[in-house]
Amino acid sequence: MAEDEEIAVYDEVEIEDMTYDEARQIYHYPCPCGDRFEIALMDLQDESNDIAVCPSCSLMIRVIFDQDNLPKPPPDNAASETTQQVPVAA
């Protein structure tokens, strides 16, 4: 986000206070409306976004985190492709 852009956020939340869904690779935090704020791990890793949004209302929170403490991305499929057996015609 551009530094001159000012976004009105409901709160600033430490990532340690959020819940991480490893299967969906999304961080969650309870929203006052009863739903929950969500932000994808990929958005945090590429530093393009630090704003978690609630899908049910207009509230947003800023996620406070250290890039080095994020979960590592899953390994590329390229490595697994080289180890797969390929049938060969005789």
Image: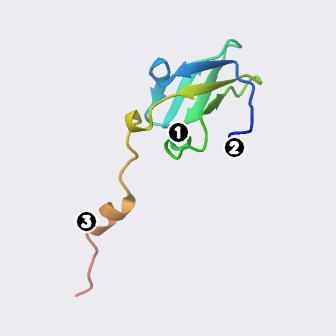
Horizontal side of residue 3 vs 30, given as left or right: right
Q: Which label is found at residue 59?
A: none
Residue beneath disc 1: 44
The residue at the point 56 percent across, 42 percent down is 43
**Is 11 located above or below residue 43 in the figure?**
above
Q: Position of residue 30 (x, y in %)?
A: 59, 16
Q: Position of residue 28 (x, y in %)?
A: 55, 25
The residue at the point 60 percent across, 44 percent down is 48
Binning the other alpha carbons within 10 Å of mark 3 as few (below 14), some (14 to 19) or many (20 upward) gives few
Q: Quick one: which residue is furthest to the front in this view?
A: 4
- Amino acid type for the residue under numbered disc 1: Leu
Q: Earlier in the sequence, mark 2 or mark 3?
A: 2
- Amino acid type for the residue under numbered disc 3: Thr
Q: Earlier in the sequence, mark 1 or mark 3?
A: 1
Residue beneath disc 3: 83
Q: Quadrant of the N terminus?
A: top right
Distance Cα–Cα, label 2 vs label 3: 43 Å
Binning the other alpha carbons within 10 Å of mark 1 as few (below 14), some (14 to 19) or many (20 upward) gives many
Q: Secondary structure at mark 1?
A: helix
Q: Position of residue 14 (x, y in %)?
A: 50, 21
Q: Which label is found at residue 2?
A: 2
Q: Position of residue 53 (x, y in %)?
A: 67, 29
